[in-house]
Image (cartoon, rainbow, N blue to C red):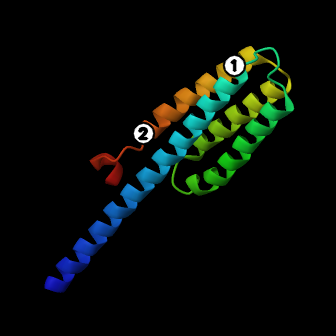
Amino acid sequence: MKKKWAVMIVIILLIVGLCVFESIYIQNSFTYLYGELVKFEEKISEDENNIGSEENVAIIKDLHSSWQRRSDNLKMIVWHTGMKEVEINLSRIQSYVITNNFEEAIVELNALKDFCLHYKDDFIITIENIL
């Protein structure tokens, strides 16, 4: 009887541990993306008329590719629709930067930053998320 309880406790602890790890990974990923978006917004706000510079295009392309690497892991544990929305917004931002459209780039940046904050909150460690 003691072995059964020990096995059950180990399984419960394993499930809780994996849920905590999953939540921390998701939180860190969206915090990373949010931080990078804030830095990029500051960078393009320095010269609103010339956001299509090679440097800015390279920054957003690097951010997009680094996020794609992270999203490959995230797609295993979160809803694909959320990951798809992030990909679409990043692509739009990249397009607006390439075409030197500051207003639309800022709109998309703000939408994606807001999405990151709200999506991240969906995966806070709670009893509901563990169960």
Q: Quadrant of the C terminus?
A: bottom left
Horizontal and vertical percent position of residue 72: 64, 55
Could you tell me residue 50's position as x and y percent? Answer: 82, 19
Q: Secondary structure at mark 1?
A: helix
Above or below, comparing residue 39 to residue 27 in the picture: above
Q: Which residue is mark 2?
A: 122
Q: Residue at x 78, y 31 (%)?
A: 56
> Would you name the residue on which mark 1 appears?
45
- Residue in the picture at 56% in, 52% down: 74
Foreground residue among 57 and 75? 57
On screen, residue 16 above or below 43 = below
Mark 1 or 2 closer to N-term? 1
Crowding at dot 1, Cα within 10 Å, few <14 / some 14-19 / many 20+, comes out as some
Q: Can the viewer see residue 57 in this picture?
A: yes
Dot 1 amino acid type: Ser
Furthest residue to the front?
46
Instruction: Examine the image and state in which quarter residue 16 appears.
Output: bottom left
**Residue 1 makes an appearance in the image:** no
Q: Is residue 106 left or right of residue 115?
A: right
Is 58 situated left or right of 20 in this image?
right
Residue drawn 68% across and 32% down? 89
Q: Please tell me which residue is depicted at 74% across the width and 44% down the height of the picture.
A: 62
Residue 124 image point, x, y percent: 37, 43
Extreme residue toward the left, this view? 1
Tell me if 102 is positioned left or right of 71 in this view.
right
For residue 45, above or below residue 9:
above
As helix, strand or loop, the secondary structure at mark 2 comes to loop
Q: Nearer the viewer, mark 1 or mark 2?
A: 1
Q: Residues within 10 Å of mark 2 (few under 14, many from 20)?
A: few
As shown in the figure, which amino acid type bears the numbered disc 2?
A: Asp
Where's the N terminus, which quadrant?
bottom left
